[in-house]
Image: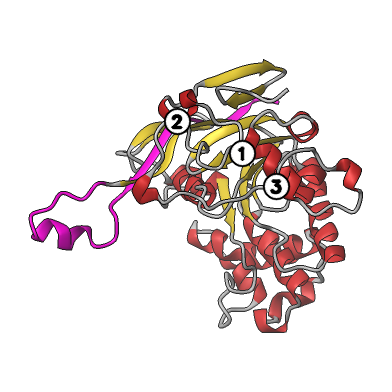
Amino acid sequence: MTGLLEINELCVRVQPPGALWQRLRGRSPQPLEILCGVSLGLAKGETLALVGESGSGKTTLARAIMGLQPFSAGTIRFQDAILTGRERRWHRLRRRAALMFQDPVASLSPRLTVGYLVTEPLAIHGRPLPDRRAAAARLLSMVGLSPDMAGRYPRELSGGQARRVTVARALAMEPALVIADEPTAGLDVSVQAEILNLMTGLQRDLDVAYLLITHNLAVVRHVSHRMAVLYLGHLVETGPTRAVLERPRHPYTRALLASEPAIDPARRPDGPVLGGEVPSLYDRPRGCAFHTRCPAASDLCRSVPPQDRTLGNGHRVACHHPLD
């Protein structure tokens, strides 16, 4: 697999709510750090799962990749284009990358037909109407829907059908990368399996890469080649999915796995279930961001940020005391 996307030391800082009012009163508000030095790579035809609790920065990272969220430091390289926070070279990226939103029904305008919604990316990029009509039939067939559904409206679709429409829409421009935000959220288990199998089959046929944002570790286990774990904007562990799930080396990763519902308790890693509250971005912990919730935290963890360690076979962890 060849390199498709490379993110290097990406930082996102935003002004806190009420920043303008504070400036008018003579105060200097401190920006909030949403992402802190995140570095990731994604290969052509690969699935990388991005996991972590709500507020960890997963969606912010996706928005930054698509140019929807300015970033204050670092670079993003997509294919042969290098993007920085001060550049606006996103047009080519958006032709070769697509974003699938979490709620398939809410992301589809109720006033537009399925056929128009599926081919809207083609219209934006100037494809003629006859081409779009033919493409609608092809795309709907590709995701297992009848071409006759092109005349329907989103309100007439089931949750599974709406998700298939968003998959077809994402693939309209034949992208090299699809960022999928919780692609199985709100679906029945059987429908989840159908959507995941559909996406896997399309990846095999089209050689498309997926950046998969999810809380569902069962989904990660089923479809991803590699996984990355975010905590409070920091990347704490990355590696091949099987290696990370079978032998998590960061206490946060192990706690996430221990909290996962499991039919077979023998498959659940030993360790404490994740407890406590995620710290506020207004008062970030010094040292390791996870030390306030880590049962093995030391004085070193409370004062010095950990550096990435390479454990072999692409497995990396940012922890002063990696687990055995």
Residue 260, placed above or below residue 45: below
Is residue 22 left or right of 242 when viewed as pictured?
A: left
Return the disc, 3 or 2, that comes first in the chain's sequence. 3
Q: Position of residue 292 (x, y in %)?
A: 50, 41
Badge 3 amino acid: Val
User: Image quadrant for the N terminus?
Assistant: top right
Q: Quadrant of residue 241?
A: top right
Give the mark, 3 or 1, whose residue is nearer the N terminus: 1
Which residue position is annotated with label 1? 229
Q: Residues within 10 Å of mark 1 (few under 14, many from 20)?
A: many
Q: Is residue 82 visible?
A: no
191 is within the stretch colored magenta:
no
- Would you name the residue on which mark 3 appears? 273
For marks 3 and 1, give the CA distance: 16 Å
Q: Which residues are magenta?
A: 1-30
The amino acid at mark 2 is Arg
Q: What is the distance, in whole Å, between disc 1 and disc 2 at their CAs?
A: 20 Å
**Residue 84 seen:** yes
Mark 1 lies on a secondary structure that is strand
Query: Label 3's element?
Result: loop
Number of callouts in the render?
A: 3
- 21 part of magenta stretch: yes
Sequence-earlier tag: 1 or 2: 1
Q: Nearer the viewer, residue 268 or 296?
A: 296
How crowded is the residue under tag 2: few (<14 C-alpha within 10 Å), some, or many (20+)?
A: some
Q: Which label belongs to residue 302?
A: 2
